[in-house]
Amino acid sequence: MMKINNNAIISHHELVISKIIAVAWALIALAAFSFLAMRFWPYTMDDSYITYRYSSNLASGHGLVFNPNEFPRAEGIMSPLYAIILSIAPLTGMDIVLLSKWLGLFAAFTTGGVISVLIYRMATTMTHLHPTLAALLSCTGFAYYLSDPYVVGNAVCGMETALSSLSLSLFLLSLFPSPNTTLRTKYVRGLLTGFMAVLVPMFRPEMGLFVVAALGFAYLVCIENRSHIMVSALTFTLVGLVYYSLRFAYYGLPFPLPFYVKQGGLSLSGIGPLKEYLKHEAHLFPMVLVCLCFALGPNSGPIRRKSLFLIPLIIPLAAQVAYFATIHHIMGFGFRYMQPIHVVLVTLSFFGLALFYQMARQIKPVLVLSLPVCFSGLVCLCLMLNIRAYRPAHQLFIDWYTTMTVRGDERAQKIRDAAGGAPMSIAINDCGRIPYCTGFRTIDLAGLNNRAIALHGKSQASKEEIRKGDPDFVVLVSSEPHGQESLKGWERLTNADVIELGYLYAGTMDVAPNYYLLLYVNASRSYDEFLQSLISSNVLDLSTDYAL
């Protein structure tokens, strides 16, 4: 038997079993991650194609814009950095969709590794657990994170989500206090933390709230690391100002256009999807409460100083959750916007389990089961929870969304073929696949890539943009085929509005149940050949009122 810090008696047998189980959980995590990646691989968000379009325009020399030669420029992407990274694909002949998916999987897997390292460091410095048992705990968190179907689904969706999670996990790891021996080491770590802090809002702007709060509370409570935090904050501020100034000079607005479209102000517009996420991860929150009690509790000495690091994690987490409650529901699809804070939640929860086990063992050491047995049961429970989440995640990402978008891809390709390379233009709400595949100059009626509509958000702004842009086609969404009276969408245009603007209703393109694209053509031009091509391709159901 060996005794660790006078309160945790560990047997050699227990240590051996712990090592075996830790390796087993790591292998299970790899297997689960690979399985989920294969199952969710077909899932690609429509918004990803917006980023692909910006990246392709950048690679073609048009700049980071939605439409070539447009001014003022529209910033319809939340992460210019991610778009710049993806521009490597068209420059090198790679498939941009494949690049985004593999990059997402790499980022998600690496994030799981960073989480496990962070849990291990916290467990070995703030508790009396033996390092082998701390490794078992970190592998448990690793397995839980990588077997989460929503983590993997969002990794292959083509968005910057996984990279945002990775950047936040690296920031937290670099922020973690360590025994520095020299002032130079502190400054180097401070610079590293500052640069990691800048990357977080470069991938997801709203996560800047978490970074600022984390640095602020770290400075207040982590007194021994104030020089590190000061350098980090200064680096974050200076580099962030340079990035922000360049972005502002290029686009001319303080925030990306999706912020103006989706921000709900002081209302609780996002409370619905946020409640769904909190319900999905409800089993983790009790351990976060354990972490909070530990951080505020009567510890002393080195452990007390280390435990204060939990405050710059818990309070920013609460602030970020509160902020997400103000965002419109569309931002919560598949828990996508919650993925970065999910990193913090998993880290805190599994460290909280270490605290809970240590406390239980100190109070009733005879009645507490061995750590391998406890965490074997824990991992089984966590995996069961993720297995239970697999079905709704698959129904959302694959059965509903991907089934719908496969037909959307076909429609987009047929529209491109029907155009025959002609420089056409379109006004449409869903500006993902169709604008990207066709290359049409596009008026985004949702406002994500149109300044006037994003800043005013009224049907009058949409009508004015159509009038000024004079596109060849206007495409509106309806819940019924030929449903001119059942139109729906952000633009809030009616059939009468479009007719008044000089367009004729041509027909319906079906995409999914209750989701139909109604095609209106410019009455001043002839599109007979284009429409005939769509009809022969079984894409367009021509209106009986339209004569070719």
Image (spheres, rainbow, N blue to C red):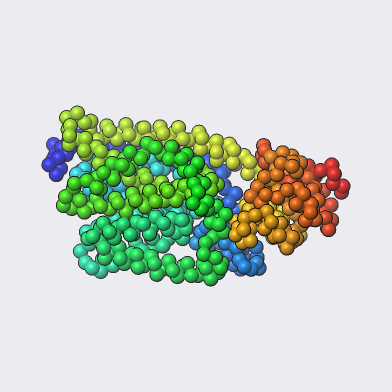
Residue 273 sits above or below residue 264 on the image = above
Task: Name the residue at 84% across, 46% down.
Answer: 546
Residue 81 located left or right of residue 498: left
Residue lying furthest right in this view? Answer: 547
The percent coordinates of residue 323 (x first, y second) are: 44, 51
**Labels in figure, total:** 0
Looking at the image, which is closer to me, 272 or 391? 272
Looking at the image, which is closer to me, 540 or 298? 298
The percent coordinates of residue 192 (x first, y second) are: 34, 63
Residue lying furthest top in this view? Answer: 367
The percent coordinates of residue 126 (x first, y second) are: 22, 48
Residue 200 at least partly seen: no
Q: Quadrant of the N terminus?
A: top left
Which quarter of the figure has residue 218? bottom left
Task: Name the residue at 42% across, 48% down.
Answer: 321
Residue 242 at least partly seen: yes
The percent coordinates of residue 448 (x first, y second) are: 60, 56
Which quarter of the figure has residue 356? top left
Residue 40 located left or right of residue 496: left
Task: Name the residue at 41% across, 62% down.
Answer: 198
